[in-house]
Each structure stands twice: as structure tokens, then as C-alpha cells.
């Protein structure tokens, strides 16, 4: 006897102030925030920020604030705040042409000012926008090769 096809599991929205599975933007945002990933592998981080793994491992030795934990298998796992710090270091070293020592000093200055979080969040946003632009240009090239 053939089994009926499995129905995909559905995810319920959390109950909000206006009742179960509220469709309001507030409950939707709350739901999306809870689904955010907490750990990223070195390969995922390198792909997101356009880095080579050996560069990232080297930066771990040079920047004291960058020390990812390791999972049971011994693989590096990065959290969201470390992603932001890596994006800031990448911006300083690759885009603004700081040396490693200069980038380390600049991070210390930002720490003293208390603006590291703001700068690192902005750097991560710019990195994602840069990668999104590249993907959109690749799609445009596929759709209209003569456009370039």
C-alpha cells in the first residue's frame, strides 16, 4: 500500500498582543529575529565576506577580539558579533588600505570611543550590499549579455 505524500511542516507565528499568528509587522519581525542563525562556519563567513580561510585564520592571531569558539568536531564557529568585527577588519584592511597594525590601532581607537559596534554593523551592511550588487550584476549579465 502506497503512503500518502508527506505534508511539509508549517511554522506557527508566535502569539502576539493581538492574538495567535498575528499578521502585524511587529510580530513578523519578532518571528524573523528568532530564526536568525547564531553560528556560522569558516567557509560560510569567507563566502559572505569574500575572504580566504587562511586570511581569516591569520587575522585571529593578530586581532585579540577575534577568537571564535570551536564546535565538538573542532571546527571554528563564528557568531554574529564576530561577523561584524570581521567585516570591519576587512573594510579597514582591504578598502581603506590599513596595515594590520594600523587596523588594530584603529579598532582600539573605536573601542575607546565606544563606537566599534556601530562601525562594525555598518561594515557588515556594506559588505552584504556589495555582494548583492555583484549578484544582481551577474543576473543582469545572464539576462542581457549585450548590456555590458
Image: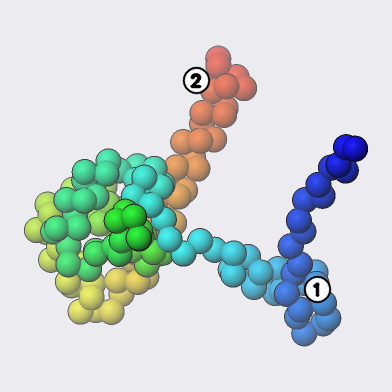
> Which x, y percent locates residue 147?
55, 20
- Left or right: residue 98 versus residue 28 is left
- To which quarter of the image does residue 139 belong? top right
- Left or right: residue 98 versus residue 43 is left
Classify mark 2: helix, strand or loop: loop
Point out the tag, 1 or 2, that comes first from the N-terminus.
Answer: 1
Tell me the residue at 19%/54% (across/down).
59
Q: From this viewpoint, which residue is outermost toward the front?
A: 1
Q: Is residue 112 above or below residue 85?
A: below
Foreground of the two, 9 or 124: 9
Tell me the residue at 49%/40% (across/down).
133
> Which x, y percent locates residue 119?
33, 66
- To which quarter of the image does residue 1 belong? top right
| Residue that badge 2 annotates | 148
Query: Could you give the CA–CA distance between mark 1 and mark 2, rounded to whole angstroms?
Result: 46 Å
Q: Is residue 107 above or below residue 91?
A: below
Rendered image coloring scheme: rainbow
Foreground of the two, 126 or 66: 66
> Which x, y percent locates residue 13?
74, 69
The mark closer to the camera, 1 or 2, is: 1
| Residue that badge 1 annotates | 22
Tell me the residue at 77%/85% (across/down).
17
Q: What is the total number of numbered labels drawn onto the structure image?
A: 2
Q: From this viewpoint, which residue is outermost toward the bottom?
A: 17
Tell me the residue at 9%/58% (across/down).
101
- Left or right: residue 118 versus residue 19 is left
Say few, some or many: other residues with alpha carbon within 10 Å of mark 1 (under 14 / 14 to 19 / 20 or more).
some
Amino acid at each position: 500500500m502506497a503512503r500518502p505524500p508527506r505534508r511539509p511542516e508549517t511554522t506557527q507565528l508566535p502569539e502576539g498582543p493581538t492574538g495567535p499568528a498575528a499578521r502585524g509587522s511587529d510580530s513578523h519581525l519578532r518571528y524573523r529575529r528568532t530564526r536568525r542563525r547564531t553560528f556560522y562556519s569558516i567557509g560560510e563567513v569567507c563566502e559572505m565576506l569574500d575572504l580566504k580561510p587562511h586570511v581569516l585564520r591569520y587575522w585571529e592571531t593578530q586581532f585579540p577580539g577575534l577568537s571564535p569558539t570551536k564546535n565538538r568536531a573542532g571546527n571554528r564557529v563564528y557568531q554574529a558579533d564576530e561577523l561584524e568585527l570581521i567585516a570591519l577588519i576587512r573594510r579597514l584592511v582591504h578598502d581603506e588600505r590599513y596595515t594590520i597594525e594600523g587596523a588594530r590601532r584603529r579598532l582600539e581607537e573605536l573601542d575607546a570611543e565606544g563606537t566599534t559596534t556601530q562601525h562594525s554593523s555598518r561594515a557588515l551592511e556594506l559588505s552584504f550590499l556589495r555582494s548583492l550588487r555583484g549578484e544582481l550584476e551577474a543576473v543582469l549579465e545572464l539576462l542581457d549579455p549585450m548590456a555590458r
